[in-house]
Amino acid sequence: MAETRAFQAEIRQLLDILVHSLYTEREIFLRELLSNASDALNRAQFEQLTQHDMLDADAEPEIRLAMDEGAGTLTVSDNGIGMARADMEQNLGVIAHSGAKAFVAAMQEGKGAAQDVIGQFGVGFYSVFMVAQRVRVVSRSHLQDERAWAWESGGDETWTIEEAERERRGTDVIITLRDDAKEFLKPFRLKDVVRRHSDYIAFPIVVGDDGEATNRQTALWRQGARDISAEQYGEFYRTLTLDFGEPRAHLHVRADVPLQFYALLYVPQGDGPNLLGMQREPGLKLYARKVLIEEATTDLLPEWLQFVVGVVDSEDLPLSVSRESVQATRVMARLKQTLTRRLLGELKRMAEKERERYLELWQVFGRYLRQGLAVSEEERESLEALLFFNSTRDDDAASWHSLQDYAGRLAQGQTDIYYILGEDIHSARRSPHLDAFRRRGIEVLYFTDPVDPFMLMGLETYGEHRLRNVDEADIDLEGIGDAGDEAEDEQGEALGESDFDALQARFRAVLGERVQEVRASHSLVDSPARLVSGEGAQERYLYRVNRLLEREVELPVRTLELNPRHALLHNLGGMLASRPQDPLIDATIEQLYETALLQDGLHPDPAAMADRLLLLMEAATGRTPAADEESAADAPAVEANGEAFDESADSG
Ligand code: ADP
Ligand code: MG
């Protein structure tokens, strides 16, 4: 007796779409069924490697299409792994199906055409209802003690399951074609569809009574690149991922020595979660001599290249399931090395020959390559050629410069490469550290990616050039670039020595252990102060790296440099001489220090400045908190000229 069950709501919706919409490319139902048959055969092959008492252990894998004009049926048969009753119920029937839901949503939002994407939602089987009145699936599991079962549905509300007869393991999908889909009874039509969509299925697909397979059975990656069209590369990419779009790059490798293998690797479109809202599992599909050994192995690429997807098919890997063997380990290690090199080579080629496409890729995946630089000594040189940064040359977030570009246009007398660390170019470009560099026309690269400090651990030099952070205290720009005719005194008069000394002492007292030293700056022009770092550059990156990793760390203790020519310092000096007790002095000192932190993107808690900022604003607008009429009247205006406050003071 057949048991009747209702489809779950999502599947009903999906079926409704498939049955009632008009599709121009209904033929893709066959692609989906053949892909399922091929998966079933792959899994049977895999089982065969371990399990010898399975049903029909030595059956030759094969897919058959049988047409019955009289009955109006097309049957797709395979001798793959088959399904037991529970498998059928699960896979074709009842379980909550996130893929169905996502597919329906994607259709409603008009994301891609059903025929292009249905297989990617894990609901490809149901596409059969584009052409079927009824579908009956008869299947027998490879497990010895299972019997055959039949699942059946008219693509409406319900499905049934009952006992059936089938002697051998495998699955028949028996499709009663709709009147308007009888074309799929014609051998020439079927063969055309097979060649177009399923040519590279690795198992023979035999149509009708033909004595030979219709498909070439050469997996795409085993074919010559010359024979493969861009569409084919794209289509295969989409079957591998959950993307609708095109890959950003592909690499097709056929190697003979020292290892014999095929690989087809892709840099995907995006890095985020797929259409089902899931993060893509990293890893490459691994075949050993055409047999699928692992769906997703992460052993074939370093961690920082795990954004790459694709297939590797090795002729040298032992077919045994346990890849722990010495031989397997050795082959895997060599494959990994070769694939890494080839990938980096392809990226380099792109960076040189297809700069625009590469830069788009860089903006999505650059973070991984930066990470590679930090951890991979061997690939350092190849990776250096792949780095691109924004620069003070144009202060343009959309314009990218390589280290090679930079090194090719150093200023007069310049040997080092300068960079600035910051949160983003928008805030970093106002940094006081840049004053002196801008004045002398020396280019500085913006390192604003959160991974950049980490990257710097592996990038201390580029060729013969040192990389130097503009906040390093001992950078001496004397003799580099062109300072122009701007004489020092044109920038205003410096604070007198004794006034400066007093101010310096006050800064020291207020900031205490938070700064290493307080001293006069030779390089600041428009900014009142900055924090500079001494030796031990690595420690500075450590702070940012740890913050990236969300670890608690102490702020690095640095030296505060003051600009003795700046109006703010003049004002402060004046106040200190006339009203040393005024609370505005210490508040301004605190604020100067914290503004410098902010400008370096290092302030741990910017919101904490709010109270002090209010106090300073009150004073700036004329009323001192001391409420002392007299001193309020002659209080020098605290010049809130810290650029961090004032959007309009945009000098960049
Ligand atoms: P997907 O192939 O993405 O998993 P489908 O809707 O195409 O999604 O198929 C659903 C499931 O039904 C498969 O995962 C598989 O478990 C089962 N199935 C479909 N066709 C076959 C078949 N010919 N042999 C064995 N299992 C099958
Ligand atoms: Mg499928």
Image (cartoon, rainbow, N blue to C red):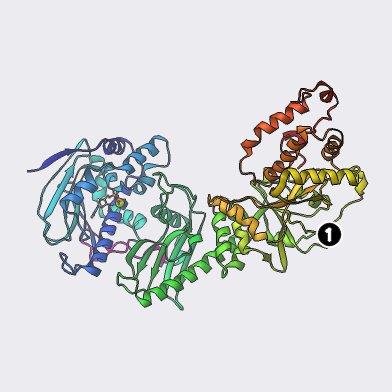
Give the side of residue 525 with respect to residue 358, left or right: right
Q: Is ligand 1 within 8 Å of the beta carbon of the residue shown at mark 1?
A: no
Decide whether residue 594 is among the magenta residues: no
Q: Nearer the viewer, residue 343 or 383?
A: 383
Above-or-below relation of 260 to 127: below
Q: How many numbered marks, from 0 up?
A: 1
Seen as rendered, the residue at the extreme left is: 1
Near-viewer residue (107 or 227): 107
Name the foreground residue: 456 vs 629: 629
Residue 122 in sight: yes
The residue identified by callout 1 is 480
- Whether 212 is among the magenta residues is yes
Quarter in which the N terminus is drawn: top left
Which portion, as a residue range, is magenta? 201-221
Report whether residue 73 is seen: no
Q: Quadrant of the C terminus?
A: top right
- Residue sitting at x 17%, y 58%: 141
Along the viewing direction, whichever of 27 and 274 lies nearer the viewer: 274
Residue 386, position as x, y percentages in the image = 61, 61
Q: Is residue 153 left or right of residue 375?
A: left
Secondary structure found at label 1: loop
The answer to which quarter of the image holds residue 288 is bottom left
Left or right: where does residue 534 sit relative to residue 31? right
**Which corner quadrant of the image does residue 376 belong to?**
bottom right
Secondary structure mostly seen in the magenta stretch: loop
The x and y percentages for residue 93 are: 22, 43
Residue 40: x %, y % from top left? 25, 58
Q: Is residue 486 left or right of residue 592?
A: right
Q: Amino acid at mark 1?
A: Ile
- Position of residue 213 relative to residue 423, above or below, is below
User: In the rendered image, which quarter is residue 495 located in?
Assistant: top right
